[in-house]
Image (tube, rainbow, N blue to C red):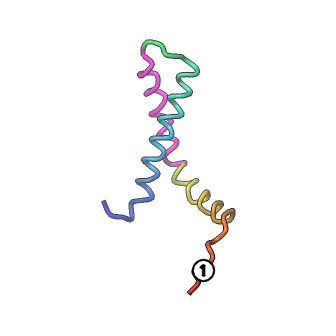
Amino acid sequence: MPARYAPVLFGFILSGLMSFLVSGIATFRNAGLVDGFLNIWIGAWLPSWLIAFPVVLVVAPVARKLVGVLVKAPAPAAR
């Protein structure tokens, strides 16, 4: 895959993993470890991922800019 797709692939993987973990925790807290837990979890995760992926693509550049404002730039190296 060409390097130009790296930001989109990163957002795809990040949103998938984060929505998977968060939906799993929320499902467990709401339903407990019941029969069919995995089916309930996956049923909650897939729609969450469909929302999370485009949101990550929009929010990531804003987050990068905010981090750039909050973090000091490194001092130039002495020669």
At 55% from the left and 54% from the top, the residue drawn is 58
- Residue 22, placed above or below residue 64: above
Most distant residue in the right direction: 70
In which image quadrant can residue 61 be found? bottom right
Residue 1: percent from left, percent from top: 30, 59
Magenta residues: mostly which secondary structure? helix
At 60% from the left and 80% from the top, the residue drawn is 76
Location of the C terminus (image quadrant): bottom right
Residue 7: percent from left, percent from top: 45, 58
Amino acid, disc 1: Pro
- Residue 22, placed above or below residue 68: above
At 51% from the left and 36% from the top, the residue drawn is 48
Mark 1, Cα crowd under 10 Å, few <14 / some 14-19 / many 20+, is few
Most distant residue in the left direction: 1
- Residue 78, placed above or below residue 55: below
Q: Which residues are magenta?
A: 36-55
Task: Name the secondary structure under disc 1.
Answer: loop
Q: Which residue is mark 1?
A: 76
Most distant residue in the bottom direction: 79
Most distant residue in the top direction: 35
- Residue 54, placed above or below residue 31: below
Magenta region includes residue 10: no
Residue 32: percent from left, percent from top: 53, 16
Depth check, front residue: 45 or 50:
45
Residue 52: percent from left, percent from top: 52, 43
Total label count? 1
